[in-house]
Image (cartoon, helix red, strand yellow):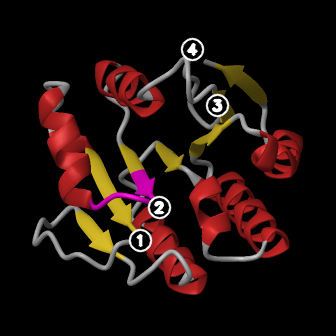
Amino acid sequence: MRIVKKELILVTYSEKGCRDPAGSILTDLARKKLGAVYVDTGKSCAGFFQKLRGLKINPAGFFCVDCTGEKTGAANSISVKSPESLTELSIAITEVLLSGKFDFLVFDSPFTLLTYNKEPVVIRFVQFVCNKLRALGVGGIIIIPATSSSKELINNVAQAADRRVSL
């Protein structure tokens, strides 16, 4: 996948055909030496760092924000207490991005937030994140599974994105 600095990319994937869309994205970011904040709404940062080790990627250029409430103790991670805590998640993302150390935010996946929050709330939250990325001059990669229940979210993110990639 072609990754361009400051670009907002919507990545959709078939859950049947693509097992780990984040893995190839993280590998591309590491290869291009682009630092990234990885927001995982369903797994812990410990799992994220294990994934990086499995991909043979140095975690130094990455920061993880998760919604599990599990503390890893790693300096380059923060855990929000739950996927329902959108205000806390917003503050965590903003604080990390304001450090100026990262070129991209990888959001995997705002679709999970629909399990814990109403769809209009999640759509507004993702729009807020997209606007924050633009304001700070940071690129974004938003990963969403292409399902019938994610259609509205995908359509809204697609309006804010510079381009859409289907895996």
Q: In percent of the image, x 78 and y 38: which residue is there?
A: 161
Circle 3 SS class? strand
Q: Mark 2 and mark 1 in contact? Answer it, CB < 8 Å.
A: yes
- The CA span between labels 3 and 2 is 16 Å
Q: Badge 2 is on which residue?
A: 41
Q: Range of the magenta residues?
A: 38-44
In the image, what residue type sits under mark 2?
Thr
Q: Of the two numbered discs 4 and 2 on the same chain, state the one appearing first in sequence.
A: 4
Q: Do the residues labelled 4 and 1 touch (CB within 8 Å)?
A: no
As measured in the structure, the alpha-carbon distance from the residue carrying label 1 to the one carrying label 3 is: 21 Å
Going from N to C along the chain, the mark reached first, 3 or 2, is 3
As helix, strand or loop, the secondary structure at mark 2 comes to loop
Residue 76 x %, y %: 21, 61
Q: For the residues marked 2 and 1, what is the alpha-carbon distance in whole angstroms?
A: 5 Å
Residue type at mark 3 is Val
Q: Distance between the residues labelled 4 and 2?
A: 24 Å
The reply to whether the C-beta atoms of the residues labelled 3 and 4 are less than 8 Å apart is no
Q: Mark 4 sits on what residue?
A: 2
Circle nearer the N terminus (1, 3):
3
